Amino acid sequence: MTPELVDGDLLDQPVSVIVNAWNRNVIPWWLLLPQGVSGAIKRRGGIRPFIEVARHGPIPLGGAVRTGPGRLPFRAILHVAAINLLWRASERSIADSVRNAVALATAAGDDSLAFPVLGAGSGGYPHDAALAVMQRTLAEIDSPVRMRIVRFRVG
C-alpha cells in the first residue's frame, strides 16, 4: 500500500480514523503536559479518549489501542506506543506502531486512516528518517484501508 503524503493538520483530515502518537501508557495521562498530536486532541477533542486509553493499562512498545474520538469528527482514535519509557522512538517502534494501527483499522472495517509522522516529535527520531520508515512499512502492508501520512503544517 502506498500512502498519500500531505501537509497540514492531522485533525482536519477527511478520514475515518486518526492515529495519536502516544506512549507506553504507564504515566497517568493527566500528569502529562499536552504537546504535539496528543495536546491537539486534548484541546479540540476533550479528555474522553485519554480516559479510555488509560483503562487499557500499559501498552507494549509498538502496540496500538483503539478509543472513541471524543468531540472529534472521526470514528475512532488509534493510540500507538511509538516511544519508549525514555521518550525515544526507534525504527522498530515506529514500524511496529504502523503495523499494529493498520491491523486495528482493518479489523474494525475502517475505510481510511491518517497518521502523523510517528516518533519525530517528542520521540526525538529525525523527521525524514521516521517518514521513510513509515512509508517503507506501509508499502509492505496489504490492507483495503486508505492510508495518509500528514506532515504537520499550519497556515
Image (cartoon, grey):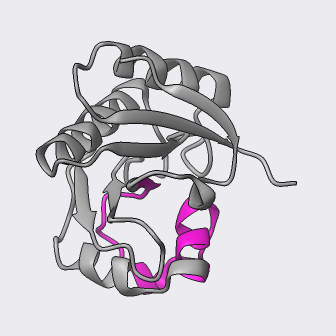
Near-viewer residue (14 or 41):
14
Residue 34: say if magenta. Answer: yes
- Tell me the residue at 53%/72% (across/down): 41
- Tell me the residue at 58%/34% (across/down): 125
- Tell me the residue at 43%/54% (across/down): 18
Residue 37: say if magenta. Answer: yes
Q: Is residue 78 left or right of residue 151?
A: left
Compared with 45, 150 (above or below) is above
Compared with 44, 56 (above or below) is above
Q: Is residue 143 left or right of residue 5?
A: left
Q: Position of residue 134 (x, y in %)?
A: 45, 25
Near-viewer residue (85 or 44):
44
Q: Quadrant of the C terminus?
A: bottom right
Range shown magenta:
18-43
Near-viewer residue (93 or 21):
21
Please, which residue is most extreme toward the right here?
155
Whether residue 30 appears in this view of the structure is yes
Q: Position of residue 50 (x, y in %)?
A: 36, 78
Whether residue 62 appears in this view of the structure is no
Figure label count = 0
Q: Quadrant of the N terminus?
A: top left
Q: Quadrant of residue 39?
A: bottom right
Compared with 131, 78 (above or below) is below
- Tell me the residue at 57%/52% (across/down): 13
